Image: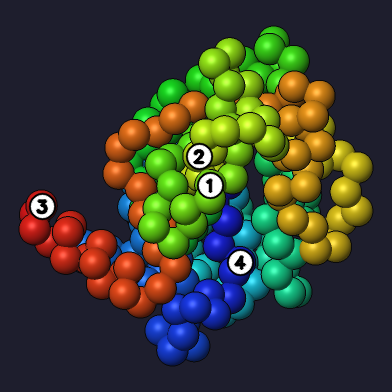
Amino acid sequence: MILAAGRGERMRPLTDHTPKPLLEAGGKPLIVWHIERLREAGFTELVINHAHLGHRLETALGDGSAFGVRIAWSPERSALETAGGIRHALTLLGDAPFVVVNGDVFCDADFAALRAAAATLHAKGSLAHLLLVDNPAHHPAGDFHLAVDGRLCAAGMPRLTFSGLGAYHPALFAELADDVPAKLAPLLREAMNTGKVLGQHHRGCWVDVGTPERLAELDRELAQKG
């Protein structure tokens, strides 16, 4: 699942007429980078949610056939936050663990490895497997502590930042009401308290494209790489 329902307030005025995931860097929309990398990792069926200017996303991406995938759309009347959006899409995602990526980040993560992590969640008695990154300048305090056994803790030092990429068991969202906004962090912290969240430190490229300045910087970097 690609999360694409956010308003992108910090990206205004760019997002006044364009959904944030359709903003371009390196000559293509942010969400297309994800779609292509997911396809290369063997994902052929995707779920994408939307709210703000969602019709523009559907027009741009269609059913996904142009990218070699099949897209199922999960529209929201108003943005349901991360956990609420996932809960709303569960009927499309099915009963097995699945991978989720924020539509407004850029990352060279190994999606095949994340897919493998999703496949082992049940056997490990876990509800989630998150990719963490070094704390960026705009988020120096980080989010979670990665213990030596691979478990994530809500407390503890040092801390790393959640990348917005993860694998989840649908049971994590089972108690949420549908069509009601809900944030992901409280669910994760509750699961961490019972040792049911795993993590991995991603040391490659990752950018939280949260401002026009970061988008422009990413565009320059990708242009230099050709």
Question: As shown in the figure, which amino acid type bears the numbered disc 3?
Answer: Lys
Q: Image check: 15 left or right of 119?
A: left
Question: As shown in the figure, which amino acid type bears the numbered disc 1?
Answer: Gly
Determine which residue is flagged by label 4. Answer: 5
Q: Looking at the image, tell me whether mark 4 or mark 2 is earlier in sequence order.
A: 4
Q: Looking at the image, tell me whether mark 3 or mark 2 is earlier in sequence order.
A: 2
Q: Secondary structure at mark 2?
A: loop
How far apart marks 4 and 2 lie (CA) works out to 25 Å
Q: Image check: 185 left or right of 120?
A: right
Q: Looking at the image, tell me whether mark 1 or mark 2 is earlier in sequence order.
A: 1
How far apart marks 1 and 3 lie (CA) works out to 29 Å
Q: Secondary structure at mark 4?
A: loop
Q: Quadrant of residue 155?
A: top right
Circle number at residue 156: none
The answer to whether residue 25 is seen in the rendering is yes
Determine which residue is flagged by label 1. Answer: 142
